[in-house]
Amino acid sequence: MTGHDVVFLLVALTTAGAGIMTVTSKNLVHAALFLALTLTGSAAVFLVLAADFVALAQLLVNVGAVAVLFLFGLMLTRAPIGREALDGQHRGLAIGVSGGLFVLLSVLIIGAFGGEGVREVTGPGVNEIGIALFAQWVLPFEVLSMLLLAALIGAIVLARRSPGDSGTEAEPTRIALSGDPSTEAERRPELTAGGER
């Protein structure tokens, strides 16, 4: 086993561990942070495999945009964060579906690449991808960036509070306009010196 294989194995195990922590974390913010770590790990896998452009694109788009947008949405919209608000009764189904997809993808990958050694990659290079992205695909690229910006602005608008709003509904305070202050204090003991608010 070469040093390259060891680095690949370490990155793959870290990414797999972060992925498991993403779906088992009890806190939604922690799960979003583990998702960012998982996406960073997948970018590192591409980097170890000498696919620099794909690694940087994965890092910029998935970690720099999607994961950060999740975190902004969670923090700004006051979404329920704890496990009790998010738990469903479909864990067995979720484990079965994810396990089935893992087996299916493993079989397809091993069937496509197993036993043939390293293949030479053919196809467009980084220059051709960059020219295509910023020439004929620039409009969808900009529309996607505007969609992410609109989602971020929507989260800010939803989370914006009115002045004095604490996030919980307060009990209204009633003030009597007539009467002697001493009788008002007798009627409402919380206004006396011992029970001042």
Image (tube, grey):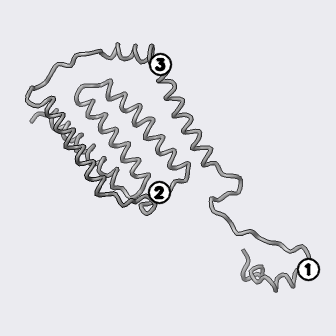
Badge 2: few (under 14), some or many (20 or more) residues near its Cα, within 10 Å? some
- Amino acid marked by disc 3: Val
Question: Residue 126 in the image: x percent, y percent?
Answer: 33, 17
**74 to 56, vertically: above or below:** below
Question: Residue 86 in the image: x percent, y percent?
Answer: 43, 58
Residue on which disc 3 sits: 138
Give whichever of discs 3 and 1 has the lower sequence position. 3
Q: Residue at x 29, y 36 (%)?
A: 42
Residue on which disc 1 sits: 179
Q: Is residue 187 left or right of residue 133?
A: right
**Label 3 SS:** helix
Badge 1: few (under 14), some or many (20 or more) residues near its Cα, within 10 Å? few
Pointer 3 with pointer 2, Cβ within 8 A: no
Question: Which residue is more in the foreground, 156 or 48?
Answer: 156
Quarter of the figure that contains the C terminus: bottom right
Pointer 3 with pointer 1, Cβ within 8 A: no
Quarter of the figure that contains the N terminus: top left
Task: Nearest to the eye among marks 3 and 1: give it.
Answer: 3
- Amino acid marked by disc 1: Gly
Question: Which residue is more in the foreground, 113 or 188?
Answer: 113
**Label 2 SS:** loop
Identify the mark at residue 81; answer none if there is no mark: 2
Q: Quadrant of residue 84?
A: bottom left
Q: Quadrant of residue 128?
A: top left
Q: Residue at x 46, y 44 (%)?
A: 70
Badge 3: few (under 14), some or many (20 or more) residues near its Cα, within 10 Å? few
- What's the distance in space between the residues labelled 3 and 2, CA to CA? 37 Å
